[in-house]
Amino acid sequence: MATPKEVSGAGPETLRQLGEMAITSEILVGSEDLAEILHRLAQRAMEVTGADYAAISTFDEQGLLTRFIYTGISEEHARRLGKPPTGRGLLGALANQDRPIRLESTREHAKFTGWPAEHPDMDVFLGVPIRAGERTIGSLYMTREAGRPPFSEVDEVAALVLALQAAAVVSLVMAREGNGRLQLFEERVRIAHDLHDGTIQTLYALGLECDAMTSRSDFPPEVKETLHGAVQRINELIADIRTYITMLEASTPSGPPNLTRDLAFVIRQIVPQTMMSVVNISAAALQELTAQESDDLLYIAREAMSNSVRHGAPTKIAIDLRQTSEATVLTVQDNGVGFDEATTRRGLGTVTMRTRCERLGAELTVIPIPGMGTTVRIAIPRRYDEQEEETDD
């Protein structure tokens, strides 16, 4: 990480601005959730540099952008912008930088490719890499609108000090998060093996025993009919558990949770190429989710898609993640045959979906329309802090 350089003519304003950086440590205390920490760092970057807008990103080991958390843009405006940046152009250039980029106008930089429609006219730019060891693990981006004064050397030094603090905190949380996902995967594999070697074998033996008893001549017809039904239900349960095992053992991309990347990965695993899939992910919704919420939503989406493909015979599946004023909402919808809730057995996957929703404090709604398809909707109530509530008033 580049060290803060000497600032020519450093006076009271310089000392005041650098002294404020001590506040950052207090702001970061009390949270181990990476999304929340990144949001606080982005907000802090805007404050210490006097930017109109600020953002922070993280990169994976290949230099690809994995998270993009912003501040200064309203949620309504963010929803109109759609998907977050993918790390191309000027933002991506910082992935390979070890020094800041300070521009009086973004148009000066060879990597600048322009802003999408309805994007604020950000012109003055300051980008600072967040370095851990010899690798850039993220970047801070600060911008001002056209016509505003450029960032100064003092602003650059303040952002550099903030990037040093960010490097220490973010690298630690990313390491914990990565280890947690590794441990979670190992636990999933262990559970899958236990289900296969223990539960399925026991159910299979029970099914054989029930099936053998249906041939006994001393059992009346109604008992034999009950036994036939038991065998059928045992076979259905075994099929459910086998599907569940497959999902537990399914590999997932390494690294921290990222719904944009992970949903695309799951779609490639589950949805046949002959079936159309449409994904719409709102940047505003994505940045509010914690790592645990992202993992749970990924599982629920995987289960919903699996049910659609196996039972619904659809030609199209649509996945939508967006933010309303009250909730972060994931919807999985297909145009398949639907089902009748009154006559359809609730499988193991559906039970697990409901369990995960309860853990999230989320509302799960399943809307089947026979002959027209099925919609699965998960709504996670939004979290507001006191400052947001005061702003909303």
Image (cartoon, rainbow, N blue to C red):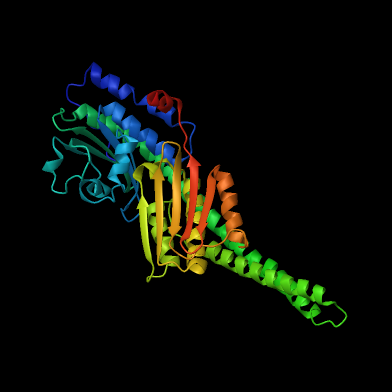
Residue 339 vs 38, above or below: the answer is below
The picture quadrant where one finds residue 244 is: bottom right
Q: Does residue 130 appear anywhere in the picture?
A: no
The picture quadrant where one finds residue 99 is: top left
Q: Is residue 139 left or right of residue 221?
A: left
Residue 137 vs 350, above or below: the answer is above
Split into 4 quadrants, where in the image is the C terminus? Answer: top left
Q: How many numbered discs, if any? A: 0
Q: Farthest residue in the top direction?
A: 12
**x%, y% of residue 230?**
73, 70
Who is closer to the viewer here, 195 or 255? 195
The picture quadrant where one finds residue 21 is: top left
Split into 4 quadrants, where in the image is the N terminus? Answer: top left
Q: Does residue 36 appear anywhere in the picture?
A: yes
Q: Farthest residue in the right direction?
A: 218
Who is closer to the viewer here, 389 or 135? 389
**x%, y% of residue 124?**
17, 34
**x%, y% of residue 249?**
54, 64
Q: Is residue 213 left or right of residue 86?
A: right
Residue 131 vs 218, above or below: the answer is above
Residue 35 vs 312, above or below: the answer is above
| Residue pictured at 39% horizontal, 68% vertical | 275
**x%, y% of residue 387?**
41, 25
Q: Farthest residue in the left direction?
A: 108
Who is closer to the viewer here, 231 or 17? 231
Q: Is residue 354 left or right of residue 12?
A: right
